[in-house]
Amino acid sequence: MSLELHAQRQALEELWEQGLSGHQLLQQHTALVDGCILDHFQASPAVGATRGEIALIALGGYGRRELYPYSDVDLLLLHDRKAKKDMQAVAESILYPLWDAGFDVGHSVRTVKDAIRFAKEDFIFEVSLLDARLLTGSASLYQELLGRYQKKILYGQRQRFVRTMDEMCAERQEKYGTHSYRLEPHIKEGRGGMRDIQAMLWTAKAVFGLPDLDAMQDAGMLSQADRRSFQESWNMLARIRNRLHYVSRRHNDQMHFELQEEMAAAFGYKDRMGMLAVEHFMREVYGHLQTISVVTDLFFEQVQELLGLSEKDKGEQEVERDICIRAKTLRLASTESELAARPGVFMRLFLQAARKGLPVHHSTRRLIARNLHLVDEHFRSSKRVANTFLGLLTGGNNPAPVLEVMLETGLLPAYIREFGAVESLAQHDLYHIYTVDRHQIQTVAELHVLRETEAELFASLSAPHLLYLGALLHDIGKGQRKDHSVLGADLIDEVGQRLGLEEKERDVLAFLVRHHLFLPENALRRDLSDQDFIRDTADLIKESELLTMLYLLSMADSKATGPSAWSAWKASLLSDLFLKVRSCLEAECTTDAHVEQGEEQGATWLLEQVKGLLQDDEPPLRIAAEDLPSDYLISFRPEDVAYHLRLHRDQATALQQKVLLFPEKKQRSWSLLMLCRDRQGLLAKLCGVLALHNLSVLAARIFTWPDGTVVDMLDLAPEAAIAFEEQDWKALEYDLNQAVNYRLDVGRKLYNKLESTIHGRKRQVQQLHHEVVIDNETSARHTVIEVYGADHLGALFQLTQALSDFHLNIHRARVATEVEQLIDIFYVTTEDQKKIENKELLARVENTLLCVVRDGEGDFS
């Protein structure tokens, strides 16, 4: 029977591949399992020998005839008291063949009384009885169960049922998320998934006696438009869930990132219009999940109101013309014909929602969705509507929840069509956790938080509405496979004209959109002590207020992107860049002469500060300070320089023989100071030993004093370093000294460590960008090498070793990892402290580094 059933299931899958619809597949799969169970039931000697009555009942999705390819088969074996002793044999005769055939069977054996008692205790079992279907056996026993269920469980319990359903949905959302646009949506349990569909259908059936969508529409619980869109989305989700099961070859209802491209190909999606096939596919998935989410929300709001579970209606309170408050919800008080004459009330309604923090009533949300044709060119170009919209954004309360409702009703994309172009748009990477539309709204939410935490900066802004618009629209250029910042800036001018912005305001808005990535990208990748870079940044931005707006937007955007896009370390770098550029703007250091003069004066001033910190009895240190390089002086605080000089004096003997490490816990990271005599490949060995001890480098500053002393400062990721104790740092120092004295083969140790963990590592799930960019323009003194590739254990060791093999000096390093993408930036010079100008050498360096990030995992030779 197992082989025969397996063949039948394979044949069913082939029919599905040939075009069988999602619901047809479910029904035929259900019928196939029905036949198998009935055959065993009828052939079972144990059933024939039963002394009482039994009924075999299908529950849950199986009961609804919605059995997905690898879903559980839920059975209830109902019996009377006479059959009690026979039920174990009956159950085994039916269940064992199903288990042998590979089905995951959930079952219970109960009397009617037991079933009703358990239903009172377990809500999941209670709702499963709503889908109970008699497979075979005693019809009278089955009818007795249904009768008692109606009388003992459902009758007079409508409010209790709805409250419990609401609690169950809230618990599920807490586990699987409150939004339908998650990176890896759960098609069954997630927001807008199958469980939301069933929750609505169960409630309609249990509370109102409405068996299906048609009955719900006839009863006025669903509009015709909602009914149609809901059914379309349900059909598509059924197809997706079927495909997920077949692709996974198991019961899997989550759209894992690594499956999404395969799913898109299976559904026939192609790369087009500048978007990947998987992005087109996921956009449709999110759209359907959102449809289910919106319709079910509207339904449950209506149910709460009908059963008296929502706020009591204490009469109507007029807010302004056409808008009123009833039962603590905002509503439109105008008829549809009156709306046609005054459509601007749509925006005024949401302004009031933002001001008062009240929800918009479900009937009003439906009314707006039905009348989006009123949002025409006259509406979009209305100065009054624009002022209302801008007031909504900047009024003081968090506008994000209101923007969400405007998006769900369709008003926001109808009003700003460019926003509609990125609605439900997925970004196929592990970096962005939201769709583009939701990400932009989340950016507004994060900006509102910054309004409190960065109140002084906000107070300095003369045009905060431009900052909020920039947050809401900064990614409208996405989805074209081109530079979305440039495309967005081009689009924003037309948006600004429709909103009635002056030309200067539009220029500011376009600048924010065009350069919204500039500060965070450069804070992570550039040497922030490079005065040329600071000057160039000041030249680009020009005004302190514009810099402040860009800084606030950068923080909000990063926080809204996802957890991997923001950290205390990144916050400190961004703040450092902001403060340095602001100081430059305020000092008007915008020419080469200013920069050179400022750097020289800065180093001289710092040197005097260092001397002032050194005691009168430390003249040798004062003399030594005179010889310190300018770039070293401007890279540290005076007290740090004095500390380094004293360490150098106190450890002079030890420095001749070994490498010394001095860890320091800082506010947002750990710093590791290394003092030693210069030697070949030193930084590479340090990076390798750090990797062996599970420590990650965030940044490195490398200096050599005139006497040959190396002073390196490395910033380490706090996650692993925070657990280090004194003995751990001593072990690290010991291993480093073993390595520099050639008594520890760092490459071999890294290879062994990689081999020991390779089977436990997570499989790479996204395509990564591999590139090496060599830049001789950004820095006046250094060749800047940017390396992009797959992050892996020991990658920084391999890269720094390769640079050392070319006899290149590394002066600065920035290390970033975005999910699995390595982004390492090196500031290097040749042995004679010049940029790399030799074209042949440049090509060899580029090819070698590219091989490291593309093919180098495990190659530590």
Image (tube, rainbow, N blue to C red):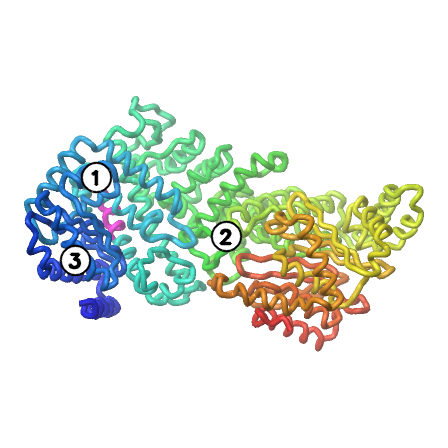
Q: Residue tagged by mark 1?
A: 119
Q: Is residue 672 magenta?
A: no
Q: Residue tagged by mark 3?
A: 94
- Out of 639 and 181, give the one closest to the viewer: 639
Q: Position of residue 206 (x, y in %)?
A: 19, 39
Quarter of the image where one finds residue 328: top left
Mark 3 or mark 1, which is nearer to you? 3
Give the class, few, some or many, for how many residues have Cα within 10 Å of label 2's Cα (few <14, many ≥20): many
Q: Residue furthest bottom?
A: 840
Report the quarter where the N terminus lies. Answer: bottom left
Q: Position of residue 281 (x, y in %)?
A: 37, 60
Q: Earlier in the sequence, mark 3 or mark 2?
A: 3
Mark 3 or mark 2, which is nearer to you? 3
Relative to 827, residue 619 above or below: above
Quarter of the image where one finds residue 250: bottom left
Q: Which residues are magenta?
A: 221-231
Residue at image point 68% right, 72% down = 845
Q: Earlier in the sequence, mark 3 or mark 1?
A: 3
Kindly identify the amino acid type of the residue bearing the numbered disc 2.
Answer: Asp
Q: Position of residue 546 (x, y in %)?
A: 63, 44
Q: CA distance from mark 3 to mark 1?
A: 24 Å
